[in-house]
Amino acid sequence: MHVHRRQRAAVRRAWAGVVIVAMAVGIGAVAAGLAKSSEDTQLAAAQAETVSLLQQQRQFSDVRTAESDTSLLQAAQQVGGSTEINWSQMLGSVQSKLPTGVRISGVTIDSASATTAYVQSLDPLQGQRIATLTIDAKTSGLPAVPEWLDSVQSVTGFVDATANSVTRDDTTGEYTVNLTIHLDEKALDGRFAEARKKD
């Protein structure tokens, strides 16, 4: 009899263990279900917020496109204008350096472009340049060409200058001097680069 009681006690303990394990599993399942439900709620809220943000972004897609296009345009202006010289200002500067009574009657301009580098002279005595300005200047008196060449040295971007020819018109008595002035990168106006720096 004593053995039988021990067996029953062992069976009861076994059943108690099964019940405790079952309760632990049940509590764990309920806790997992609650956690999953909470995470599902958070996921749904995050997805709703994402959809809302995407809808708001779509409202401003035109603005973003315009900003992108503006940046592209500014970059293109900077590249395209990187070799730009204010020729009106440059010719005014050259004219102001020439003696009184001398007037510019003809101009030929050759300069670098945004896509093509300026061809340099093979003559080692000529400096590096980005543009050449060839002018015809007329005067009624005998020209003092060396003085003219000295006077244009103060033009912004000046590299060197040469007198190509001096001719006299027998009909009018005027002299025409053909001058070539080479300019370097200091002659560039840089207006698009300055505008970009301000942005």
Image (spheres, rainbow, N blue to C red):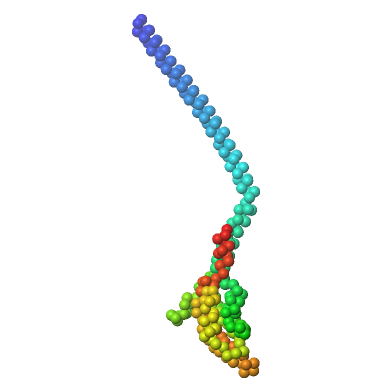
**At 57% from the left edge and 38% from the top edge, which residue is drawn?**
46
- Compared across the picture, whether 18 is left or right of 72 comes to left
In the picture as drawn, the residue positioned furthest to the top comes out as 1
Report whether residue 116 is seen.
no
Quick one: 113 or 141, which is closer to the camera?
A: 141
Report whether residue 50 is seen.
yes
Quick one: 66 or 134, which is closer to the camera?
A: 134
Quick one: 79 or 8, which is closer to the camera?
A: 79
> In terms of image quadrants, where is residue 9?
top left
On the image, the x and y values in percent for residue 89 come to 60, 74
- Compared across the picture, whether 70 is left or right of 16 comes to right
For residue 83, above or below residue 104: above
For residue 44, above or below residue 27: below
Quick one: 198 or 13, which is closer to the camera?
A: 198
> In terms of image quadrants, where is residue 76?
bottom right
For residue 49, above or below residue 68: above
For residue 19, above or below residue 50: above
